[in-house]
Image (tube, rainbow, N blue to C red):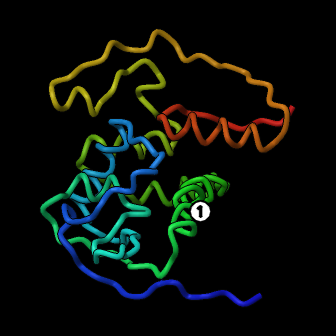
Amino acid sequence: MHIRDRIKELRRVPAKSLRPNPRNWRTHPKRQQEALRGVLAEIGYADALLARELEDGSLELIDGHLRAETTPEALVPVLVLDVSAEEAAKLLAVLDPLANLAGKNEDVLRDLLSDVETAHPGLQTLLDELAGDDPAANGGGDAAGEADGESEPPLPDVFQIVVQCRDEDQQRELFERLTGEGFSCRLVNL
């Protein structure tokens, strides 16, 4: 199989100059926004946004909308791709779901998390979720919301819902949609 390199160049451009893709289907719940702010505050940019150049010379985002929105005044790293509108749409549709298909090795994750520290509450919430110590899921409320003066009522209990799907594709689609909206989900084949 021949695999093409579609990266034309790396540019650093003001985030506010990037055009959001009008077909971007991803939403960004508050806890994701807070976790991203924590990573950016403690580490900075460590990944490039993806964009394609339009006929007028402007750059239209394919991936990285939340990063661009979070840091509009920053010069951000952008990989400019040599892709058509159709290819950009395909990337926009599959990049995040493709990453969500990865499994996890609990032992390796636990070892990794034992070496990770943060002072940012939004990032700590994400780390707690990864470790299985999610205070929001255990009735502790939204730590990120409490930090900025907004408090949500605590969850009375954790509820489990079983959904029967007609096939694995439907199961995967539902899983990706729910996790994208901030729900904690687990795939189980019965």
In the image, what residue occupies the spot 41% across and 70% down?
50
Residue 105 in view of the camera = no
In the rendered image, the vertical position of residue 106 relative to residue 182, given as above or below: below
Across and down, in percent, residue 86 comes to 57, 66
Quadrant including the C terminus: top right
Across and down, in percent, residue 132 comes to 53, 38
| Extreme residue in the left direction | 73
In the image, what residue occupies the spot 19% across and 31% down?
147
**Observer-nearest of 70 and 112:** 70
Tell me the kind of residue under disc 1.
Answer: Lys
Is residue 116 rendered to the left or right of residue 100? left
**Observer-nearest of 85 and 2:** 85
Q: Toward which corner of the image does residue 64 lie, by quadrant?
A: bottom left
Residue 149 in view of the camera = yes
Tag 1 residue: 90
Quadrant including the N terminus: bottom right
In the rendered image, the vertical position of residue 103 relative to residue 162, given as above or below: below
Across and down, in percent, residue 181 comes to 48, 35
**Observer-nearest of 173 and 145:** 173
Across and down, in percent, residue 84 comes to 52, 74
In the image, what residue occupies the spot 29% across and 43% down?
34
Q: How many marks?
A: 1
